[in-house]
Amino acid sequence: MTETKERKQNMLKIGNKEFEKLVGMAPLAGITDSSFRKIIKERGCQFSFTEMVSAKGIYYKDPKTEELLHIDPEEGLVGAQIFGRDPEILSKVIKENLNHREDIFSIDLNMGCPAPKVVKNGDGSALMKEPETAERIINAMVESSTKPVSVKFRLGWDEENINFLEIGKICEKAGVSFVTLHPRTRKAFYAGKADWDSIKILKEELSIPVMGNGDLFSKEDIEKMFRHTLCDGVFVGRGALQNPNIFGEGESLSLQKIVELIKKHYSLKIAQKGERRAIPEMRKHIAWYLKGVPNSNPLKNKINTENNLQTIFKLLEEFEREQE
């Protein structure tokens, strides 16, 4: 009885959900759409996010933005990740567009995206330079939302402006449900080594749950991050693109399984978006699935210029036979 009670106390609680060891998928623009979320859910992913969605796009009812918020029941637990810098617009879209959506479990504020087209408008990681603005935004979101609110951020804008602890404490004071730290600066983008020590420091300093992110490419990496940082959960990024099994047992996929997975991914994406859009969108996924597979570069080059689905499948099957 005591053992069960102790285990319960160590469980992570977000909203009305409990997790013994949360391993989820970080939001990635152009990647984590509905089809990809179904793929990873089948392989053990406990929690994923929509691609980054513009609050203004929701506010002005942009059709492309609304499509990014498409969620199917088979995807499991999904949070909506939004970006923006206007507290009033963020508050309004949460109240009018997101609160009533039963398929959206939580709402995440993006303060980590380093993309120039996002940063130039003062969104994403540019908010790291404006803690007071960030505080107004986060307060407005928490006050407006009936769902758990979380924030993802970086170490700071650059090495001379490291302020992740300040942002974390703003989040804690505002009452967010959890924070996720990608421990690189905006200036670093995705280069260099993720500073896991900073996740550990943030975990020590905050009373709210802290999730780790960055340089998680295997099951072993996930276990190491849990041990090293004592974080409450992890969100995998690029590591899941090469091996979606990272959420489960972690074993690498055989070439046969990779080809099967690619075909399945095509079918899911086609069902959602149609063949004309699915074929070019799948090219980046194929580059990840086949990364490190010997002799696969010529195949990837052919697929990148091919628009006929049957021909693509034939190329994959021929490649599989050649490698046997």
Image: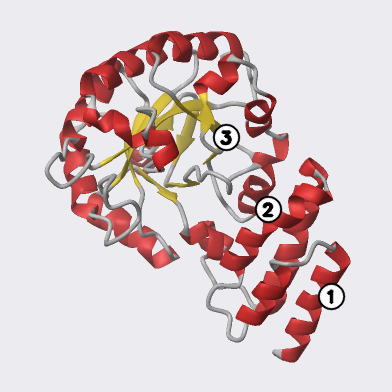
Residue named by callout 3: 78
Horizontal and vertical percent position of residue 159: 15, 47
Q: Residue type at mark 1?
A: Lys
Residue named by callout 2: 281
Give the distance between the C-alpha atoms of the residues marked 2 and 1, in whole angstroms.
19 Å
Q: Could you tell me which secondary element the residue under label 1 belongs to?
A: helix
CA neighbours of label 1 inside 10 A, class few (<14), some (14 to 19), many (20+)? few
Spot the residue most to the left: 160
CA neighbours of label 3 inside 10 A, class few (<14), some (14 to 19), many (20+)? many
Quadrant (top left/top right/bottom left/bottom right) for the C terminus: bottom right
Horizontal and vertical percent position of residue 182: 32, 46
Horizontal and vertical percent position of residue 316: 76, 75
Residue named by callout 1: 314
Q: Earlier in the sequence, mark 1 or mark 3?
A: 3
Callouts 1 and 3 close, C-beta under 8 Å: no
CA neighbours of label 2 inside 10 A, class few (<14), some (14 to 19), many (20+)? some
Residue 168 visible, this angle: yes
Q: Residue type at mark 3?
A: Val
Q: Residue 221 versus residue 242: which sits nearer the camera?
A: 242
In this rendering, position of residue 101 left or right of residue 188: right
Picture quadrant where residue 323 is located: bottom right
Q: Residue 72 versus residue 129: which sits nearer the camera?
A: 129
Look at 23% across and 42% down and name the residue there.
Answer: 155
Q: Residue type at mark 2?
A: Glu
Q: Earlier in the sequence, mark 2 or mark 1?
A: 2
Look at 17% across and 34% down and name the residue there.
Answer: 165
Residue 9 visible, this angle: no
Observer-side mark, 1 or 3, equals: 1
Give the distance between the C-alpha atoms of the residues marked 1 and 3, in whole angstroms.
34 Å
In this rendering, position of residue 166 left or right of residue 114: left
